[in-house]
Image (cartoon, rainbow, N blue to C red):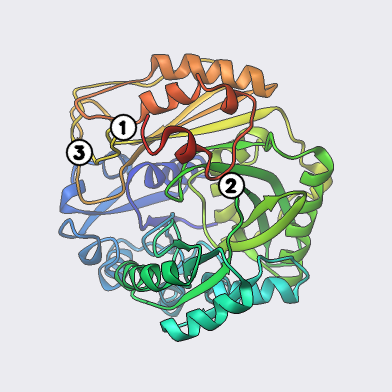
Amino acid sequence: MFEKVLIANRGEIALRIHRACREMGIRTVAVHSTADNNAMHVRLADESVCIGPPPARESYLNIPAILSAAAITGADAIHPGLGFLAENAEFAQIVGEHDLVFIGPSPEHIRLMGDKVAAKRTAQELGIPVVPGGQAVTDLDQARAEAERVDFPILIKAAAGGGGRGMRVARDKAELALQFPVAQAEAQTFFGNGALYLERFLAKPRHIEVQILGDGQGSVVHLGGRDCSLQRKHQKLLEETPSPGLNMAERQRIYDLAAATMRKLGYKSAGTLEFLYQDGEFFFIEMNTRLQVEHPISEMITGIDVVREQIRIAAGAPLGYRQDDIKFSGHAIECRINAENPETFAPSPGVIQRYHAPGGMGVRVDSALYQGYTVPPHYDSLVAKLVVHGSTRNECLMRLRRALEEFVISGIETTIPLHQKLMASEAFLNGDYDIGWFERTFNGKT
């Protein structure tokens, strides 16, 4: 097992990884920008190294600085967390070339599944159904020809991206001409790659993902699925497991297919296969070769620590269980608490004046906040994840409503009121929603 792990990330996920390491007897190294001098993961880590100024490209995306921090502290492995360099195949390869272990998949699998066009092609070859489309296009003429083949309405997507960036809907040729250059420019800005692809736009699908773990030694298991359909502008607001929109047979079908596919691929580490589901059919859309923000709900219903498993697998340990050994219990929901105005969604950085996290049976809060901490304006606005587990979905919802009432974060605006409004929605309470439901219902406002 590793003696010291460098955590190449920040915020709640860096703290989450630190906790898993300490429970395994592993020392940790926190890297941080000058904006995060007083961050909780920096305060709790065994060692810390400042790697640059606030802009991410000069700190958390600065590969030489991160490798130097690993060298001077004697770390023997690097955990990339999520976002930043987590799905950067070049970084994973360079880490290995410096005699360090990258806690994640192989560079080859990151490259293969990180390019969404190549990932869809691979999925098809492995027998997974995909949304019609998927050919890479680099100019408007190619896009017009592909749109004729796929048929309108179509979804324009960034080949190298995610999180809704570089994504636009075109319902006809005129709208394609308007949206294509916008999506291309956004993809170039956020991912350094303006390549796009087109696929059939599904009107009211659910967004279903399957959490898998593979040890690279032939064993792959799934930890069930997550319904991530509650979204605003392709950004997830809340996730739950199991999906209230699927029956048991449908769930089992997609879970088994995801695990079997990754077994064929010889996948190593944690990963998530994402699908759209509509009218009884699943369509593969992408794979995330990293830890997901919403991984805690899978942990709550299985009792398996996903981060711990990532570390064990990276150290060469096989999975210590088979699929039949994994027992699924109850229902879990995660609310993403962002430092944003709950109606306009404008970022709200600032000093935390009061902080009180809810507790009680079945309640978990993943957050790096504390009273007096300054939420910086330079990074993602996620500041806490409220995760609740219950024996049934109804019990889970009642517990979540109570936990939201207890949650106190003052000094900044947060999306807690948004989640409280969702708890009052009959459609949400009935599990009757899809990926466009939030914007149709609230028109982008709460």
Pointer 1 residue: 343
Circle 2 sits on which residue? 306
The crowd level at tag 1 (other Cα within 10 Å; few <14, some 14-19, many 20+) is some
- Residue 166 at x, y = what percent? 40, 65
Mark-to-mark CA distance, 2 and 3: 30 Å
Query: Dot 1: what SS?
Result: loop
Dividing the picture into quadrants, the one containing residue 406 is top left
Q: Quadrant of the C terminus?
A: top left
Q: What kind of element bears circle 2? A: helix
The residue type indicated by label 2 comes to: Val
Q: In the picture, residue 128 is in which quadrant?
A: bottom right
**Residue 285 or 270: which is nearer the viewer?**
285
Is the residue 265 above or below the residue 80 in the image? below
- Return the disc, 1 or 3, that comes first in the chain's sequence: 1
In this rendering, would 371 be left or right of 80?
Answer: left
The tag earlier along the polypeptide, 2 or 1, is 2
> Can residue 289 be spotted in the picture?
yes
Name the N-terminal-most of marks 2 and 3.
2
Residue 14 located left or right of residue 399: left
Q: Nearer the viewer, mark 1 or mark 3?
A: 1
Please state which amino acid type lies under the numbered disc 1.
Glu
